Image: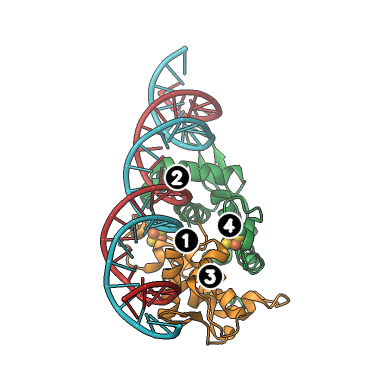
Chain colours: A orange, B green, C red, D cyan
Amino acid sequence: MLKFSKKVEYGLMSIMHIARMKGNKVTARELSEQYNIPPEILGKVLQKLKKDQLLESIQGVNGGYRIIRELTDISLEDVIISLDGPVVITHCCKGTGDDCTQFKTCNIIEPMQKFQNKLNKLFSDMNLNDFFFDEEQKVEF
Amino acid sequence: MLKFSKKVEYGLMSIMHIARMKGNKVTARELSEQYNIPPEILGKVLQKLKKDQLLESIQGVNGGYRIIRELTDISLEDVIISLDGPVVITHCCKGTGDDCTQFKTCNIIEPMQKFQNKLNKLFSDMNLNDFFFDEEQKVEF
DNA sequence: TTATATCCGACAAAATAAGTCCTATTTTTT
DNA sequence: AAAAAATAGGACTTATTTTGTCGGATATAA
Ligand code: FES
Ligand code: FES
């Protein structure tokens, strides 16, 4: 149920690693070996992050990935959306009812949508610098 | 990925309905028909909620389920834990590494656990009355 | 031209979630 | 006592989603 996908885990591990390299390149192979991640999957993860401009890539020999944006400028939501698409915690939340047998009589559509908004705010308010490093950060709910 | 299970959806729909009955009994069959939920699954959902004392059950003819606790006294976390077990957003978060190929070198264990705690706080701070009805509630993150 | 790297689609396997089947038990009504 | 209506719950099957694999194409430096 409520669980991050492996892709998001791989993505966060990679960004963490790359961020620590302070602008130096890291190859997919290095990451794959260091963290024991299947190289084909990791490749696609990095490619998606590049496509959404969370990472920069250099092709060819001596290529690799590096980070150019500030971690404070990237939200956890950015990573999730890039790798898994938008968060939809219940079928209700799409509003169409196409794929939910209960849609017509569902009595929790509104509460669910409100709650999903709260969750999304949690993700979008969380920047990667705080997520990774700011241990004493106090988040008030 | 981050999605509530059908069991949690069914449970919340049922509690919402039963709560509106203000202490009167509701049968599983009524709920099953009203909301188009497979009766066997709904039965088990209600039984779990009963076992964890979120609902009360009356067996035999004219039996059914009813609610005795205040909605403000039940948290969203209670419902989730009863129906799906504790939330574990990543394998990291268990700390054992039994089922994670990346555990030994994982560089996001701490951040993930901290974030999971934030999520859990969101779930445990959200009582069902607010979840269902309190539309203007302002939650500050 | 070769080696090393990113890029990418189609498919297969594994894991999880959802649903079904079948039977037992409890309690009221007849 | 028997029948009916309801909860209780185990074992199994199916469906869906997630994860991983295979095969190749493209780009660039040495
Ligand atoms: S619309 Fe599907 S459960 Fe609410
Ligand atoms: S321990 Fe598994 S990804 Fe962190």
Query: How many angstroms separate mark 4 from mark 2 (CA)?
Result: 29 Å
- At a point 33% along the width and 63% down the height, the residue shown is A97
Query: In the image, which disc is placed on residue B91?
Result: 4
Of the image marks 1 and 3, the number of the one nearer the N terminus:
3
Query: How many angstroms separate mark 4 from mark 3 (CA)?
Result: 22 Å
Residue for badge 2? B42
Q: Position of residue A20 (x, y in %)?
A: 62, 79
- Callout 1: SS: loop
Q: Residues within 10 Å of mark 4 (few under 14, many from 20)?
A: many
- At a point 49% along the width and 79% down the height, the residue shown is A65
Camera-nearest label, 4 or 3: 3
Pointers 2 and 3 in contact (C-beta within 8 Å): no
Camera-nearest label, 2 or 1: 1
* Amino acid on which disc 2 is placed: Leu
* Amino acid on which disc 3 is placed: Glu
The answer to whether residue A89 is above or below residue B24 is: below
Camera-nearest label, 1 or 3: 3
Q: Residues within 10 Å of mark 1 (few under 14, many from 20)?
A: few
Q: Are marks 2 and 1 on the same chain?
A: no
Residue for badge 1? A38
